[in-house]
Amino acid sequence: MEDWITSVMSDYGYFGIFLLILLENIFPPIPSEVVLTVGGFMTTTTTMTIPGVIAASTAGSVSGAIMLYGVGLLLDVERLEKIVDKYGNWLRVKKEDIYRVDSWFDRFGVWTVFFGRLVPLVRSLISLPAGMSNMKVWLFLVFSTLGTLLWNTILVFVGEAVGENRQQIMRLLSLYSNVVYVLIALGVIAAVWYYIRKKD
């Protein structure tokens, strides 16, 4: 995949970076860690600059986030209520559960979006509950952009600094991603177990 990513960047420059990061937000299996570190490295071998790579990747990331935010808006609380009315008994979900989650996101959503943009997988999916809770679009844009800018800046500078010796960094980033995935899976299992026990 790294060869394909490098080829896209070589052929299309900043637009290639924009497109790759936009796709990464919609299809998380495309690793932003690879795109950003490769982009940072290419600032040492092409005419691309660090500010340009950061700007292109941030624009692509926020564009993808806005698309998923829009999907979340279509799945707002009222639509979820209808789903619960129809399948609630089978899903073991009540309307009160939806209200509780929605209330929590109203209180802490902006920081959840900011820190979520620094976590693999979550950084893509966090846009959905933001839309579902009808977070103000300007708040979503501000905190999503800030979190994204921080993530992108760090990885682009890392790619520029380590250059062709970035394999070790990539292994560390891969380990970080895998640990996050395991923690997310354990968290989901624990939440489901707690929820079922509470209902019984």
Image (spheres, grey):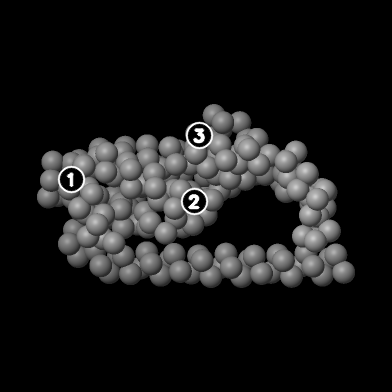
Q: Amino acid at mark 1?
A: Asp
| Along the viewing direction, whichever of 90 and 121 lies nearer the viewer | 90
Please tell me whether mark 1 or mark 2 is closer to you in this view: 1
* Residue 192 in the image, given as x and y percentages of width and height: 72, 66
Q: Are marks 1 and 3 in contact (CB under 8 Å)?
A: no
Name the residue nearer the viewer: 93 or 87.
87
Crowding near pointer 2: few (<14 within 10 Å), some, many (20+)?
many
Q: 10 Å neighbourhood of mark 1: few (<14), some, or many (≥20)?
A: few
**138 left or right of 174 in image:** right
Query: Tags 1 and 2 in contact by the CB under 8 Å rule?
Result: no
Q: CA distance from mark 1 to mark 2?
A: 27 Å
- Callout 2–callout 3 Cβ contact below 8 Å: no
Indicate left or right for 1 with 115 as reference. Answer: left
Check disc 3 and report the residue beneath it: 141
Which label is found at residue 123? Answer: 2
Crowd rating for badge 3 (residues with CA inside 10 Å; few <14, some 14–19, many 20+): some
Q: In the displayed orientation, state which residue is furthest to the right.
A: 200
Q: Which residue is mark 1?
A: 11
* Above or below: residue 191 compared with residue 71: below
Location of residue 51 in the rendering, given as x and y in whole percent from the top left corner:
26, 38
| Quarter-of-image position of residue 15 | top left
Name the residue at 24% across, 63% down: 166
Q: Residue at x 31, y 38 (%)?
A: 56
Towards the viewer: 146 or 36? 36
Q: Earlier in the sequence, mark 1 or mark 2?
A: 1
Q: In the rendered view of the protein, which quadrant contains the N terminus? A: bottom left
Q: Earlier in the sequence, mark 1 or mark 3?
A: 1
Quadrant location, the C terminus: bottom right
Percent position (x, y) of residue 171? 33, 69
